Image (cartoon, helix red, strand yellow):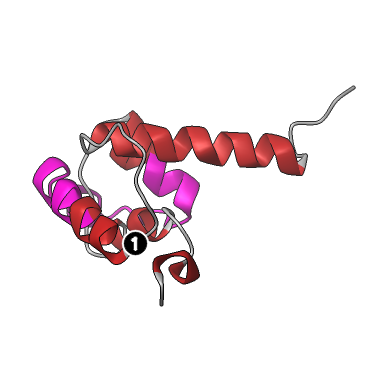
Amino acid sequence: MATTNTPAALCAAEKRGLEAYLRRIGLERELPAERATLRVVHRAHVTSIPFENLDILLGAVPALDIGSVRDKLVRTDRGGYCHEVPREVSGIAPPAEFGQ
C-alpha cells in the first residue's frame, strides 16, 4: 500500500496549500522570489484576511502549526490573530529565496 507521507506527496500537498492561500488573497499568478513579492503578498494578505481573535475571546487555544493555520485562514475563510498570520506568510518560501 502506498503512503502519502513520501517527500513527493508532501511537496505536492504543500504546493496545493500555497496555491490555495495565494488564491485566498487574490494572487493567482507566478510570483518571483524577490523582496518586492513579499510586499505584494503582505498587502494582499492584510487587505484580504481580517484580524480575528474570536478563539482567544472564547477561551480556545488556537493551534499554530502551518496546517492548522492554513486550514483556518484558507479553507474555513476566517481571519487570524497576531500569532497566526506570520505562520501563514512564512510558509510561502524560505527567507534565503528572497535574498535575506
Side of 82 where 1 appears, left or right: right
Please report the residue visible at 34 percent of the width from the left and 38 percent of the height from the top: 21
Whether residue 52 is visible to the viewer of this picture, yes or no, is no
Where residue 2 sits: x, y (%)?
Answer: 85, 25
Quarter in which the N terminus is drawn = top right
Please report the residue visible at 31 percent of the width from the left and 38 percent of the height from the top: 22
Question: Toward the viewer: 46 or 76?
Answer: 46
In the figure, 74 relative to 93: above or below? Answer: above
| Residue 75 image-quadrant placement | top left
Q: Residue furthest right?
A: 1
In the figure, 38 relative to 16: above or below? Answer: below
Whether residue 30 is visible to the viewer of this picture, yes or no, is yes
Where residue 23 sits: x, y (%)?
Answer: 29, 31
Q: Residue furthest bottom?
A: 100
Please report the residue visible at 20 percent of the width from the left and 60 percent of the height from the top: 39
- 7 in the magenta segment: no
| Residue 84 image-quadrant placement | bottom left
Q: Which residue is mark 1?
A: 34
Q: Which residues are magenta?
A: 42-70
Q: Residue furthest left?
A: 47
Where residue 8 sits: x, y (%)?
Answer: 72, 38
Quarter in which the C terminus is drawn = bottom left
In the figure, 55 relative to 36: above or below? Answer: above
Side of 88 where 53 appears, left or right: left
Please report the residue visible at 27 percent of the width from the left and 56 percent of the height from the top: 37
- 57 in the magenta segment: yes
Could you say whether the residue bearing mark 1 is in a helix, strand or loop? Answer: loop
Side of 46 where 36 appears, left or right: right
Type of amino acid under label 1: Glu
